[in-house]
Amino acid sequence: MAYRWFCGLSIEDAIPDHSVFSRARHEHFQEAGLLRGVFERVVSLC
């Protein structure tokens, strides 16, 4: 249920295949280093 809430899905909506998120991460964020920047910022705050 938390996954559905986080993604904005209702109980009737189909859940996207897990590979959608993996492909998006590899195809769109790999070169930008966006996720690494977010991760490093979170770690520095800890």
Image (cartoon, grey):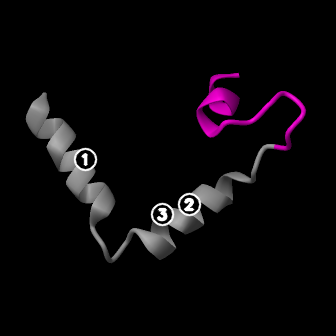
**Are there few (<14), some (14-19), or many (20+) residues within 10 Å of tag 2?**
few
Residue 10 x/y as whole percent: 80, 31
Considering only vertical position in the picture, is 33 above or below 1? Answer: below
Residue 27 x/y as whole percent: 49, 75
Residue 40 x/y as whole percent: 17, 48
The residue labelled by disc 2 is: 22
Do residues under tags 3 and 1 come within 8 Å of each other at their CB atoms? no
Residue at disc 2, secondary structure: helix
The image quadrant that residue 31 belongs to is: bottom left
Q: Over which residues does the magenta segment extend?
A: 1-14
Sequence order check: which comes first, mark 2 or mark 1? 2
What amino acid is at disc 2?
Answer: Ser
What amino acid is at disc 1?
Answer: Phe
Residue drawn at x 70%, y 31% is: 4
Q: CA distance from mark 3 to mark 1?
A: 14 Å
Taking depth in this image into account, of 7 and 44 the one nearest to the observer is 7
Considering only vertical position in the picture, is 40 above or below 43? Answer: below
Q: Which mark is residue 4?
A: none
* Side of 10 where 24 appears, left or right: left
Sequence order check: which comes first, mark 3 or mark 1? 3
Considering only vertical position in the picture, is 18 above or below 34? Answer: above
Taking depth in this image into account, of 26 and 41 the one nearest to the observer is 41
What amino acid is at disc 3?
Answer: Arg
**Are there few (<14), some (14-19), or many (20+) residues within 10 Å of tag 3?**
some
Residue 34 x/y as whole percent: 30, 62
The residue labelled by disc 3 is: 25
Residue drawn at x 90%, y 33% is: 12
* Side of 29 where 43 appears, left or right: left
Residue drawn at x 13%, y 28% is: 46
Check residue 22 for magenta coloring: no
The residue labelled by disc 1 is: 39
Residue drawn at x 27%, y 67% is: 33
